[in-house]
Image (spheres, grey):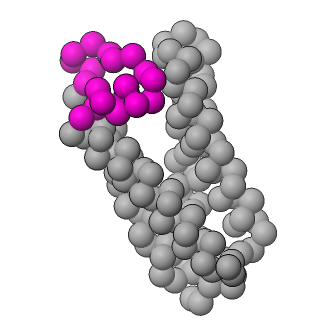
Amino acid sequence: MNKTNILKLWSAAVGSMDAVTGLLLVFSPLLALRLLGISAPSGEAVVFLSWIGVFVLAVGLSYGFAMGRRSRGETVWMFTSMARLLVAAFLTFRILDGSLAKAWMVVAVSDASVAVVQLLILRAGWWEEVPR
């Protein structure tokens, strides 16, 4: 498997993971939390989980742009890495200050891990082999 295929496979897998998670958060936020092992928030907060789901869905679908040209793939990976690192930092801070349950760390670690892998691959120049 060449680098271009790996980039596309990663984009499809990570994008699908986010898109499915986003859809779950939009249409069944309590189920999504249960699958993550996170306790349900108050009733009024559930609508905000759905709102976050729209953002997560958009991030997931953005990986579809990475399936084409090099410039799009690099841009999507840079943007999603930044978003993921910001989410991971926010969640970690809120877990440490006691605002969020420790169970949210699975999301922080997942986002940080994906971001680091993407940034390392970007730095290694793998996207340079993809046609413009």
Q: Is 107 on the left or on the right of 65, as rendered?
A: right
Q: Is residue 34 magenta?
A: yes
The residue at the far top in this view is 98
Q: Is residue 18 magenta?
A: no
Which quadrant of the figure has residue 31? top left
Residue drawn 76% across and 65% down?
123
The residue at the far right in this view is 124
Quadrant that contains the N terminus: bottom right
x%, y% of residue 37?
45, 23
x%, y% of residue 8?
54, 73
Residue drawn 56% across and 31% down?
106
**Where is 4 relative to 96, above or below?**
below
Q: Which residues are magenta?
A: 28-46
In the rendered image, is residue 100 in sight?
yes
**Where is 15 relative to 22, above or below?**
below
Dominant SS of magenta comes to helix
**Nearer the observer, 89 or 33:** 33
Which quadrant of the figure has residue 6? bottom right
Number of numbered discs visible in the structure rendering = 0
The residue at the far bottom in this view is 131
x%, y% of residue 47?
22, 28
**Where is 95 relative to 19, above or below?**
above
Q: Is 38 on the left or on the right of 26, as rendered?
A: right
In the rendered image, is residue 73 in sight?
no
**Nearer the observer, 122 or 67:** 67
Residue drawn 35% across and 50% down?
20
Residue drawn 21% across and 16% down?
43
Q: Is 108 on the left or on the right of 58, as rendered?
A: right
Quadrant that contains the C terminus: bottom right
